[in-house]
Image: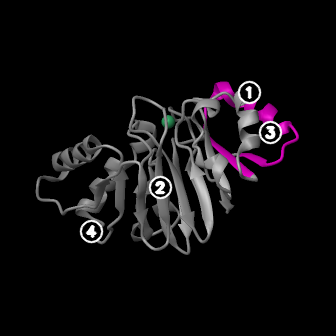
Amino acid sequence: MKLTFLGTSHGLPEKDRYCSCTMIDINGRKYLMDAGAPFVNMLIRRDIPLCDLKAIFITHLHGDHTNGLPEFVDLISWYYKDVNTAMLLPEQIGVDALKLWNNAANGNNTRALDFRVYKEGAIYDDGTVKVTAMPTKHGNGNTYAFMLEAENKRVVFTGDIAGYANDTPKVCFERECDAIVGEGAHVSFEEAKDVFERCLTNRIIISHVAPRNECALARLQAEEKSYSLTVAYDGYETEV
Ligand SMILES: [Zn+2]
């Protein structure tokens, strides 16, 4: 599978970074982890048909993970009517808000879209990817990490967490992961050092890095480690 980091910024946009949005490509089928970037425009600029997008998984409802959704919902309602992407959100209020905004923009008679509200556990399996949601302690609840399994590989996306020492998803210590995509805003990379050594992976990719954490992250990158540590940037692509 190929990961493309469409947006890697923390809670705020930066000059060269959109907010959180990562595309997973498995034999042409595309999936998004979070939608904080203007991903419709980005897919079109990359010549990727929106029909290829099979599902969007939202870790939590903060804007830096969701702001690309209203545009997508609008456009697939009235123009891209052959797009049937599943949109998985952790709270009904998010679905209600998207529907209400869509009604405001397009009236009440728009076609039904595939919104799904998920809870902890297995939330998606289309025969290509399986996704499992695991709660984290970020924000005021209803925030999740995701484990994505496809092609006999496993990737964990931590989403936003309350620090690596307290809140790294347990699965990272219990099962071999081909990659862990972690966050760099609500964490300390001093405390992450020991935690990362205990994760059952050779590969950690950090996204969502806040400027205040950049120095500590660079120091950790420079150290000798048993795993590779990459800092994602907008447009970074990698095979897992
Ligand atoms: Zn965030």
Estimate the spatial distance between the alpha carbons at disc 2 and disc 3, rounded to whole Å.
29 Å
Amino acid type at image mark 3? Gln
Nearest to the observer: residue 100 or residue 220: 220
User: Circle 4 is placed at which residue position?
Assistant: 81
In this view, the mark in front (1 or 3)? 1
Which residue is painted at 55% across and 63% down in the image?
Answer: 149
Residue 181 vs residue 194: left or right? Answer: left
Measuring from the top left, give residue 1's x and y in whole percent.
Answer: 61, 67
Q: Is residue 227 magenta?
A: yes
Residue 73 percent location from the top left of the image: 30, 54
Q: Nearer the viewer, mark 2 or mark 3?
A: 2
Q: Residue at x 44, y 45 (%)?
A: 59
Res 132 label: 2
Q: Percent x, y for residue 135?
A: 46, 41
**Residue interval drawn in magenta:** 203-230
Q: Is residue 71 left or right of residue 96?
A: right
Residue 27 - label: none
Q: Nearer the viewer, mark 4 or mark 1?
A: 1
* Structural crowding at the residue carrying mark 4, measured as other residues with C-alpha within 10 Å and reported as few (<14), some (14–19) or many (≥20): few
- Can you identify the residue that label 3 sits on? 221
Image quarter for residue 81?
Answer: bottom left
Mark 1 residue element: helix
